[in-house]
Amino acid sequence: MNVLLVNGSPHREGCTYTALVEVAAALERNEIETEIMWIGNKPIAGCLGCNGCLKTGRCVMDDVVNRFLEKAKKCDGFVFGSPVHFASASGAITSFMDRAFYGKSELFRLKPAAAVVSCRRGGASATFDQLNKYFMISQMPVVSSQYWNSVHGNTPDEVRQDEEGLQVMRTLGENMAWLLRSIEAGRVAGVRGPRVEPKVKTNFIR
């Protein structure tokens, strides 16, 4: 089993990375393979709404999003990390996730996911809520911890002093490992997945 952790910070080994490393270490202790993928610090365009990906499964803009989608096919779980920018996820990770998740429900369905956020002081819960919405619209089990998945600090060294935040990261890793093992045990035991109904879409125009 393996989990892909996505670092949505413009800093490759900054505060967000420091939090993700703590989650990854807990997963590795439970014999879950991990990879931390940095989305980079180059501009990431937002979704064009062209629906090209609905035909091919790939975004028409061939960049880090398509590299992620290739990796995602082989992943059992995901952790997405972002710094807090103006009480929201970073612009880069927002554009990244808009494009990665649009029309890709079958790729992510029933795979556990979690969000991790890093802030200096405030805005963590708003960012955490924003990221979780991608998972909930894609039928992904959302992995919890003992508190909101956030760390505080202005530098990696300060994050490493956030003892409660780091414990939250470790608990998240432990909980995700347990859930992944439980899903695998159910699969081996022949437990069927949820029944899928044909999708119904409505609007309120009469």
Image (cartoon, grey):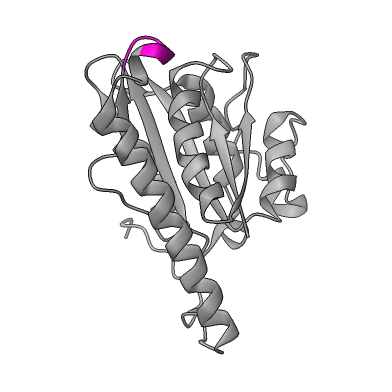
Say if 147 sits above or below 105 in the image: above
Say if 186 sits above or below 4 in the image: below
Residue at image point 50% right, 25% down: 17
Residue at image point 46% right, 51% down: 113
Say if 75 sits above or below 87 in the image: below
Would you say residue 154 sits in the magenta stretch?
yes
Q: Position of residue 129 (x, y in %)?
A: 30, 39
Q: Position of residue 100 (x, y in %)?
A: 60, 41
Residue at image point 51% right, 32% down: 21
Say if 181 sits above or below 17 in the image: below
State which quarter of the image contains the C terminus: bottom left
Q: Using the rendered view, name the quadrant where residue 115 is placed.
A: top left
Q: Is residue 142 visible?
A: no
Q: Main secondary structure of the magenta part?
A: loop
Q: Is residue 107 left or right of residue 167?
A: right
Marks counted in the figure total: 0
Q: Is residue 145 left or right of residue 110?
A: left
Would you say residue 36 sits in the magenta stretch?
no
Give whichever of 199, 71 is nearer the camera: 71
Give whichever of 29, 15 is nearer the camera: 29
State which quarter of the image contains the N terminus: bottom right
Q: Using the rendered view, name the quadrant where residue 44 is placed.
A: top right
Q: Position of residue 38 (x, y in %)?
A: 62, 26
Give whichever of 128, 25 is nearer the camera: 25
Q: Residue lying furthest bottom in this view?
A: 190
Q: Is residue 64 visible?
A: yes
Q: Is residue 95 left or right of residue 154?
A: right
Q: Residue lying furthest front in this view?
A: 29
Q: Position of residue 111 (x, y in %)?
A: 52, 60
Q: Which residues are magenta?
A: 153-157
Residue at image point 24% right, 32% down: 164
